[in-house]
């Protein structure tokens, strides 16, 4: 999956399902502080990512993911390239 | 002892999605019963149900506050929004003042079953999402409403089968009367989805009069063949009288008596004795004589046995005074966990607008209902005091007496 496609899918579910403010979405936005994603939202993001990308997020792989850009990188590392 | 009044009411049901619509339906004797084709496909013996429109809360409530609401919680949210609005209570008031909640609910089947289906398919609980737990618990309604409306007083769900809503009002009344709370939100919620009633249908307790759905619920009629499940939610703001006066709140009626009992017998078979004790206790608590009761909103669900036992008890208690009686379940179906609360709301509407809503489909009395004064049509009548009955599985009984404020 191409990077642009990953970003598009993530932006869409953040806005439509997690109801993040669209204007706050930027690669350097902090997931918690800027986008307001809390631990319960993250439980839902695990489900949405599995549905959209076909893999399960592992908490231990997410320890260094703090910005949206890093989140795109993480998903790309799982499904990118093809 | 403090006096307890009702200062706001809200409802979402099969006969109307707000108080004004419900009042019209009650006066017109309009049924909310229909057929749910999916029930037949699911193997239900009866596809009859109260038809409640699915609420749409997106845009009305933030995602985080919405996601824990099961279907019955969505109904309860809308009913509560209306009740607080009518009572003149806004978010600013709720943030500054302690308010309690007792709400009747006794299942959240859809949330439980759907979550289980996901786990069975994925074999992984982390794919359930964050809302499943908050939707699945019996206390789903109170845990969500207390969060949404920032309630900081007593907070719990009353699970007492088909008397849940009535007991919630009884307990709210007791808490305020004792001076423990000034305002308690009371009510009852009932899911209407396909998962919620299969096990009840298994008892062959539901009417199968599918050729005429609006004729199927016929409490007290000799030709009754079972109840029709229904649902939605009804909310009532109970408030200490002086507090309501100081606030300039609309005072709709006064709660003056609560009676309860448990049959201590069969799990599903009702008892005239148990009904009697609850009604007598409510009247004693209210210091009201049977002859002073102007109207009885009967529990009568349209089952052969239940209606018979209640008719026996009503005849024994009221004898010659023969107050007007109707079962609004003839129009709404059996709103189960919600019924005890919605039926107080229906009866308060009748009291405030001086009419008795009809017990529709009561065409032929049987040996027991023939002794009662059942309203077959809408009757214009001043109501000063009414009694409302609610009985449930396990023999739990609740009766409430409500008085007009003069």
Image (spheres, rainbow, N blue to C red):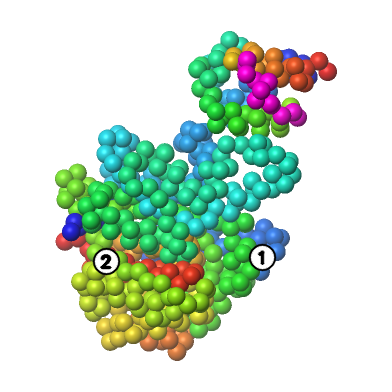
Q: What is the chain identity of the residue bearing mark 1? A: B
Few, some or many residues within 10 Å of mark 2 (<14, 14–19, 20+): many
* Label of residue B257 in the image: 2
Q: Which residues are magenta?
A: A54-65
Front one among B214 and B253 = B253
What percent of the width, then of the height, locates residue B103?
40, 53
Outermost residue to the bottom: B367
* Label of residue B282 in the image: none
User: Which residue occupies 47% across, 77% down?
Assistant: B265
Q: Is residue B88 highlighted in magenta?
A: no
- Residue under label 1: B44
With respect to residue B354, does A10 lie above or below? above
Q: Secondary structure at mark 1?
A: loop
What percent of the width, then of the height, locates residue B245?
17, 49
- Are the residues tagged 1 and 2 within 8 Å (C-beta)? no
Q: Secondary structure at mark 2?
A: strand
């Amino acid at each position: 999956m191409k990077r642009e496609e990953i970003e598009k899918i993530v932006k869409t579910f953040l806005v439509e399902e997690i109801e993040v403010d669209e204007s706050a979405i930027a690669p350097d936005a902090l997931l918690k502080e800027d986008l307001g994603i809390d631990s319960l939202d993250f439980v839902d993001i695990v489900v949405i990512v599995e549905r959209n990308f076909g893999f399960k997020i592992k908490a231990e792989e997410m320890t260094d993911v703090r910005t949206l850009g890093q989140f795109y990188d993480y998903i790309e590392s799982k499904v990118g390239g093809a | 002892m403090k006096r307890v009044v009702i200062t706001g009411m809200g409802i979402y049901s099969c006969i109307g999605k707000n108080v004004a619509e419900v009042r019209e339906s009650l006066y017109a004797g309009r049924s909310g019963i229909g057929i749910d084709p999916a029930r037949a496909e699911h193997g239900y013996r009866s596809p009859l149900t109260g038809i409640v429109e699915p609420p749409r809360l997106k845009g009305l409530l933030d995602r985080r506050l919405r996601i824990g609401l099961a279907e019955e919680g969505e109904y309860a949210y809308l009913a509560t929004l209306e009740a607080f609005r009518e009572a003149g209570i806004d978010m600013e008031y709720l943030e500054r003042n302690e308010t309690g909640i007792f709400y009747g609910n006794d299942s959240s089947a859809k949330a439980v079953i759907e979550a289980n289906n996901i786990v069975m398919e994925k074999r992984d609980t982390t794919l359930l999402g964050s809302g499943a737990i908050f939707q699945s618990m019996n206390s789903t309604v109170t845990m969500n409403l207390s969060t949404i409306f920032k309630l900081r007083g007593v907070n719990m769900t009353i699970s007492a089968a088909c008397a849940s809503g009535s007991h919630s009002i009884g307990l709210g009344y007791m808490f305020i009367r004792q001076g423990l709370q000034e305002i308690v939100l009371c009510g009852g919620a009932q899911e209407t989805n396909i998962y919620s009633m299969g096990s009840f249908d298994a008892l062959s307790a539901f009417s199968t009069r599918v050729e005429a759905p609006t004729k199927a619920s016929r409490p007290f009629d000799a030709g009754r063949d079972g109840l029709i499940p229904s649902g939605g939610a009804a909310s009532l703001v109970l408030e200490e009288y002086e507090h309501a006066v100081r606030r300039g709140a609309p005072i709709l009626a006064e709660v003056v008596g609560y009676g309860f009992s448990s049959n201590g017998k069969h799990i599903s078979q009702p008892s005239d004795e148990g009904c009697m004790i609850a009604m007598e206790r409510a009247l004693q608590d209210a210091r009201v004589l049977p002859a002073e009761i102007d109207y009885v909103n009967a529990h009568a669900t349209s089952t052969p046995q239940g209606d018979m036992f209640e008719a026996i008890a009503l005849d024994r208690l009221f004898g010659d005074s023969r107050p007007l009686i109707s079962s609004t379940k003839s129009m709404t179906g059996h709103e189960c966990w919600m019924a005890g609360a919605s039926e107080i709301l229906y009866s308060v509407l009748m009291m405030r607008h001086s009419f008795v809503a009809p017990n529709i489909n009561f065409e032929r009395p049987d040996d027991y209902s023939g002794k009662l004064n059942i309203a077959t049509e809408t009757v214009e009548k001043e109501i000063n005091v009414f009694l409302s009955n609610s009985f449930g599985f396990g023999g739990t009984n609740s009766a409430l007496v409500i008085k007009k404020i003069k």
